[in-house]
């Protein structure tokens, strides 16, 4: 099956990044969100990103940027947006019940040939698919933020994902000029499990008073050649996101993966990082 048209559900940072990426590589994209203000903000963000990071740097022309934007259609009506597409990519909040409900509904309304993909960074694809009838067409395609720039895609095969769906999803991912790593279904997969442990341990160091926020981050950047420190990264991703990931990994993999008490406290105090303007740093 050739993929030409896709639907992206969720127009947040990851959703509109995926939409921009796919449209850049020639795909027609229906971008869906129930909140029309979020859809408008997403389109504006895509336009600014194309200009700032691509047109200004002479990577694409202004005309090419306009063509990319024209390939992205905003739609608050999910059921109409999935008609005529060959793949649906979900980019909603990391909540198992929410994703199970969404995929079950998509499974009932989408043509049987449509691939249903989750952009989850940590939740089991098999479990996400468990409430759906046609589990063989559900796959994990984990993009990284910012999706138009980051080179990696983590492709996850659920217990019931068919070989055909997995192969087509790999071809699609590679068509976006990404390096694709294939991973068996497991909580946190490879990347999230590793980076969560690092970030959570950094939060514990901060809580124990071993070093300041700045010194923890500087130590990691200079010692390991990281582009940003783990506490900076936690602020960027969202401290609430890492907290929910930690709760899930702790339940699935054991006590040592549970989130630091300081991380829980920060989430309760709305110190979520960049999106709330305060976290480990002020923005």
Image: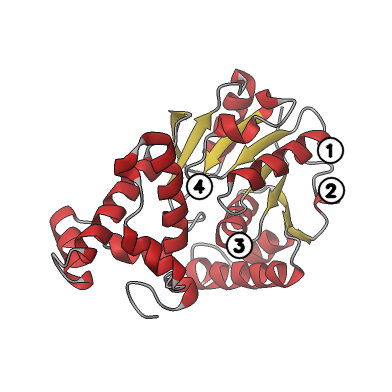
Marks 4/1: CA–CA distance: 25 Å
Mark with earlier residue (1, 3): 3
Q: Are marks 1 and 3 in contact (CB under 8 Å)?
A: no
Residue 238 appearing in the image: no
Q: Are marks 2 and 1 in contact (CB under 8 Å)?
A: yes
Image position of 96 (left or right of 37): left
Q: How does the figure colour the protein chain or chains?
A: secondary structure
Q: Which mark is residue 79?
A: 2
- For disc 3, the marked residue is 12
Image position of 222 (left or right of 124): left
Q: Which one is in front, 125 or 8?
A: 125
Residue 177 appearing in the image: yes
Q: Which mark is residue 218?
A: none
- For disc 1, the marked residue is 109
Query: Can you give x and y, in whole percent of width and height, for residue 74 in the image?
Result: 76, 61
The quadrant the C terminus occupies is bottom left
At 67% from the left and 68% from the top, the residue drawn is: 43
Marks 2/3: CA–CA distance: 19 Å
Mark with earlier residue (3, 4): 3
- For disc 4, the marked residue is 143
Q: In the structure shown, which secondary structural element does the residue marked by tag 4 occupy? A: loop
Disc 1 packing (10 Å; few <14; some 14–19; many ≥20): few
Disc 4 packing (10 Å; few <14; some 14–19; many ≥20): many
Number of marks present in the image shown = 4
The quadrant the N terminus occupies is top right
At 74% from the left and 62% from the top, the residue drawn is: 70
Mark with earlier residue (2, 1): 2
Q: In the structure shown, which secondary structural element does the residue marked by tag 3 occupy? A: loop
Disc 3 packing (10 Å; few <14; some 14–19; many ≥20): some
Query: Can you give x and y, in whole percent of width and height, for residue 236 in the image?
Result: 41, 65
Marks 3/4: CA–CA distance: 13 Å
Q: Is residue 64 above or below residue 167?
A: below
């Amino acid at each position: 099956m050739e993929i030409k048209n896709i639907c992206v559900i969720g127009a947040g940072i990851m959703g509109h990044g995926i939409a921009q990426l796919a449209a850049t590589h020639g795909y027609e994209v229906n971008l869906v969100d129930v909140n029309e203000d979020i859809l408008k903000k997403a389109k504006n963000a895509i336009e600014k990103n194309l200009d700032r990071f691509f047109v200004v740097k002479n990577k694409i022309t202004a005309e090419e940027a306009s063509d990319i934007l024209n390939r992205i259609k905003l739609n608050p009506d999910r059921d109409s947006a999935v008609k005529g597409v060959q793949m649906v990519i979900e980019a909603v909040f990391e909540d198992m019940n929410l994703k199970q409900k969404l995929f079950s509904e998509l499974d009932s309304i989408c043509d049987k040939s449509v691939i249903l993909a989750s952009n989850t960074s940590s939740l089991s694809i098999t479990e996400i698919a468990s409430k759906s009838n046609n589990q063989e067409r559900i796959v994990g395609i984990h993009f990284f933020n910012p999706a138009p720039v980051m080179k990696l895609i983590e492709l996850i095969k659920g217990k019931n994902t068919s070989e055909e769906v997995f192969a087509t999803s790999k071809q699609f991912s590679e068509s976006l000029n990404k390096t694709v790593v294939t991973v068996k279904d497991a909580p946190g997969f490879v990347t999230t499990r590793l980076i969560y442990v690092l970030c959570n341990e950094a939060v514990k160091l901060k809580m124990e008073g071993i070093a300041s926020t700045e010194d923890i981050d500087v130590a990691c950047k200079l010692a390991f050649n990281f582009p940003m420190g783990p506490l900076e990264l936690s602020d960027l991703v969202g401290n609430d996101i890492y907290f929910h990931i930690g709760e899930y990994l702790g339940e699935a993999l054991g006590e040592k993966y549970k989130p630091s008490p300081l991380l829980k406290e920060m989430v309760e105090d709305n110190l979520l990082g960049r999106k709330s303007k305060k976290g480990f740093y002020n923005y």
